Amino acid sequence: MTRPVDVAILGAGIVGAACADALTAEGLSVAVIEPAVAGGGATAAGMGHIVVMDDSEAEFALTRYSRDLWDGLMPQLPAAAEPERCGTLWVAADAEEMGAVAGKAAFYGARGVATDTLDARALAEAEPNLRPGLAGALLVPGDWVIYAPFAARWMLDRALARGAAFYAAEPRALERGRVPLPGGAWLEARHIVCATGAWATSLFPSLAIRPRKGQLAITDRYPGFVRRQIVELGYLKSAHGAASESVAFNVQPRKTGQVLIGSSRQFGVTEGGVDRAMLGRMLRRAIDYMPALARLSVIRCWAGFRAATPDSLPLIGPASGAPDVYLATGHEGLGITTSLGTARLVADMILGREPAIAAAPYLPARLEQEPAHA
Ligand SMILES: Cc1cc2nc3c(=O)[nH]c(=O)nc-3n(C[C@H](O)[C@H](O)[C@H](O)COP(=O)(O)OP(=O)(O)OC[C@H]3O[C@@H](n4cnc5c(N)ncnc54)[C@H](O)[C@@H]3O)c2cc1C
């Protein structure tokens, strides 16, 4: 016999786990439904970079809000979540990209995010393994790195300790106010949150979500080889461009001393294994920026799928035609960062509260097609 709940959450990736944590903290009764390992989807495949982004005002608002929430959560996270405030270095290859550094510094500065501009010499001193001759960089010192699958599991465990239920199930269809469970049982819920990442279209086929494959490689332990999360400025073109395939230099220091190397983006691919050609392109790009990487041993490579939307913003809010269902998906390459802000927005919507940031840019209704007029 299943107990009716206030909220059933589908998916225990970092977004579903953060929603379970936020909703149980509000005193709501919650059940989490997950067919596989909690945190084992895109959350386990990601880099764990908690980053404030400036591609649009809406992206900035959600990433900034979320990073502030992470700032508050970090002291509570166990060491196994590997929180490290290493900051982000946005690297400029030439004078033209230094112009972009100035633009980024102005954007962040006007919105109260601390940055520091590094010239060529300061950059070489900050990261001696970068190739000589780079023009400089923008340092955003407040950004973090975490081990996301552990953080997701920890948030889920906090929700379970507050009384949340967990069901191992993969519902293929929803009915108004209830979720099917194995053995013909039904879970009754006043609200349903769909946090199934790139799988969201299996429940809502008309959603404007496309899987965008990404690959990463991790090295053996080389403590101090990289000090900051280092990203080429061209990353934004790769992340937000519509190209079917792209790579960008993006390396991250892990607390273990390992170096996590990214990143690639591919549309139109459903095969989940490592694509050696893309991996080769990605590693060559990384070695171009950081030649000494070629001497390190890569010990593991993997791939995962980001849930991409046409405007690079997530879908957070009521699903069309299903008023008791809230979507919390479509976070593409920022879902680890924005999981906490998403969870707060979902909790505010369910509780009928005014959110801390405007929810309109993320409402799923923005991507619904206008009805044709006669
Ligand atoms: C290579 C790569 C690098 C990345 N780097 C970063 C980064 O540095 N920083 C950042 O912020 N983000 C990053 N991301 C993006 C980030 O990983 C994702 O946006 C985020 O993990 C999405 O979390 P999620 O909970 O929505 O999805 P997932 O983690 O995929 O979880 C969805 C869950 O839903 C479950 N599920 C599926 N179908 C059903 C069903 N019918 N019912 C119930 N459950 C179901 C799945 O089993 C899964 O556990 C990266 C992604 C990739 C691929």
Image: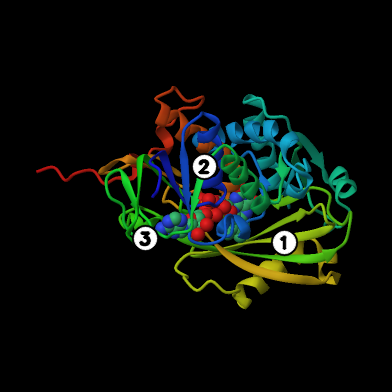
User: At label 3, which amino acid type do we have?
Assistant: Ser
Residue for badge 2: 164
User: At label 2, which amino acid type do we have?
Assistant: Ala
- Sequence-wise, the earlier of marks 1 and 3 is 3
Could you tell me which secondary element the residue under label 3 belongs to?
helix
Could you tell me which quadrant the C terminus lies in? top left
Report the Cα–Cα distance between label 1 and label 3: 31 Å
Q: Horizontal placement of 97 versus 349: left or right?
A: right
Q: Is residue 51 above or below residue 68?
A: below
Which of the two discs, 1 and 2, sits closer to the camera? Answer: 2
Along the line of sight, which residue is nearer the eye, 364 or 122?
364
Q: Residue lying at the far left in this picture: please name it.
A: 374
Q: Residue lying at the far bottom in this picture: please name it.
A: 276
**Colour scheme employed for the rendering of this structure:** rainbow
Residue for badge 3: 202
Q: Looking at the picture, how far across and down is residue 134, in whole percent?
A: 79, 52
- Asked if the residue at label 3 sits under 8 Å from ligand 1, the reply is yes
